[in-house]
Image (cartoon, coloured by chain):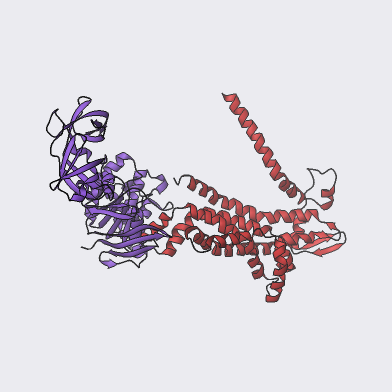
Chain colours: A red, B purple
Amino acid sequence: MVRPDLLKLVLRGLALAAVVIFFLFPIFWILLMSFQTNTQILRLPPRLFFAPTLANYTALISGTLHTASGTLQITFLRNLGNSFLLSTCSVIVSLTLGVPAAYAFARFRFRLGENIAFTLLSFRFAPPLLVLLPLSLDFQQIGLSNTYVGLIWVYQLICLPLILWIVRGYFEDSSPDIEHAYRVDGHSWWRAFSRIAVPLARPGIAAAGLLAFIFAWNNFVFALILASADKQPVTVGALAFVTAAGIQYGQIAAAIVLSILPTLILALYAQRWLVEGLSLGAVKG
Amino acid sequence: MAGITAERISVIYGKRRVLREVSLEVAAGKTLVLFGPSGAGKSVLLRAIAGLEPNTQGLVRIAGADVSALGPERRGVGVAFQNFALYPHFSAFDNIASPLRAQGVVAGEIGRRVEKIAALLKIGHVLNQFPRELSNGQRQRTALARALVGEPKALLLDDPLRNVDAKLRYEMRLELPRLLRGFGAAVIYVTQDFREAMALGDEVAILAGGELLQLGTPETIYATPNNVAVARLFGDPPMNLLAVETETRGGETVAAIAGFRFRFVASAEAAGKALLGIRPDALALVPAGTRGAAPMTILADTPLHDRHVLLVRAKDGNELVVSSRVPATSDEVWVKPDVALLFAQASGLHMATAVQERAMA
């Protein structure tokens, strides 16, 4: 009886290890690259053991890049700050608008309700470039191009539909009777929404907020076209590493490591809520 | 005479009229049972009174004040929902305290009143637990405590015993009337269970298809249902209904069936096809040859509490359900009816009640 169980355990371990290696190896390799110089990286065959250097990180943080053809100024830290500002503000705006909207779509049947909800979703189907050309002209006319406000507004195309549709499902899953009971107790509509409906949908809101943050963080093309250097996020800023003297793989790797850190930390933190949400749902009965 | 008054309540969903001009009144301290099959509109009526049904027409008064235009939070009603509707992220204490918090009661007073109602409902020991940690019975009591704690003038209970097990339902059926009387609120109690209706209702309102079919004391409705639908619904086991051909002779209507012969004082329109209703407990097993009795063959015998529910077949092939206090001693029994009701075939309206005259056999 013990042997098949043991065999199963070993096989499962191997399978898990294979999956983990498959998904995490590139990240691991990038982490290694970020501690190597460009020459070390380009060496064939690549080596697992090398003398680590912090030059890439110091270059990023100090903002000066020494290449064979001279010294370049880079604004990576500023880009990182921009990414942070743009993603955070976009998600906050999306949550403020999207959570009440999702509640309305979940609880009330109104004229054209489904059409409006679907139209909002369809923003995600549209190829960004199709929207961008007229949008950049419009933005120039009304003075929104190369502003944070303009970018955050455009980022709503990414965040808002996501939050709306995920959170709506969570509102639909919880019984309206629970809110009715709270109303009958003598609480106003707003309190029933903020004290009962929103807390019960919190796992969904957390998941949607996290996904929206990651999507906004990873966005490239909106910021590339609508913002210039000082407003650009890391995704666009990474282009600076493609220099006249070649591609700075070491710095790119270090930049990637720094730029995935915030989303990684956020995901680890939000995981608590996500797991709690799943277990709450399991025993709701 | 404060309590609850509902006048001509209609609820319309799109083109479908879920509730048609239902009017009823419950005095303070009294319990009205809303009884009917599922889909009759019982819960909808309750929600309309609570202010949770946006498509409501009609007038609702609670404790004398017109609340028709007010939101649910300003009507001063307590509601216990069928699915309990507890707040999963609040402890039992906070669930029960919710109406008091809304009223702005001070913290110490909240604690005292929650403890008191919890003790009354025997859930004092689980106040710190969350709904998911409570048993079904404790959840149901918590929901009741929450509805009662604010001492509302109107209490609306939507089939609160539906989702609890049989033993608990039995306990609560005994406990509830006393509990409710102690609060002096006007109570509307929704149920599909005939026994609950009999046990709890000072009055019973029979609702079917969104219409109020009959309103009266449980005894009156049981003895004289005003149409066939009510007769079918209200009773357990349900009333025997037999198609009969009646004859009118000198101001009397006579119906003969299953070896029985009934005489009614009814108008001439009672002649012809009709439905004869006999309650199972209006049929008794009697010694062979008793005057007014007829011989029957037993097809099935099911004990139900202290009674025996027998399915019997008369000589003319009609089948009847008999609810007897005494067990049958053989397969052949003599059955004697006590009272019978005559309903019009087409409209289903109750036409007359009769005492049996004599057996034909």
User: Looking at this view, is B186 or A223 the one in front?
Assistant: B186
Say if B322 sits above or below B129 in the image. above
Q: Position of residue A20 (x, y in %)?
A: 67, 41
Q: Position of residue B62 (x, y in %)?
A: 28, 63
Look at 77% across and 64% down and name the residue there. Answer: A74
User: Looking at this view, is B109 or A110 the one in front?
Assistant: A110
Say if B337 sits above or below A224 in the image. above
The C terminus of chain A lies in which quarter of the figure?
top left
Look at 73% across and 67% down and name the residue there. Answer: A133
Residue B77 occupies quadrant:
bottom left
The N terminus of chain A lies in which quarter of the figure?
top right
Q: Is residue A61 visible?
A: no
Q: Position of residue B305 (x, y in %)?
A: 24, 35
How many numbered tags mark residues here? 0
Residue at far right of view:
A69
Say if B171 sits above or below A146 in the image. above
User: Looking at this view, is B319 or B270 the one in front?
Assistant: B270
For residue B263, side relative to residue A3 (left or right): left
Q: Is residue B299 visible?
A: yes
For residue B283, side relative to residue A261 (left or right): left
Q: Position of residue B90 (x, y in %)?
A: 41, 53
Look at 61% across and 58% down and name the residue there. Answer: A212
User: Looking at this view, is B356 or B12 the one in front?
Assistant: B356
Say if B171 sits above or below A73 in the image. above
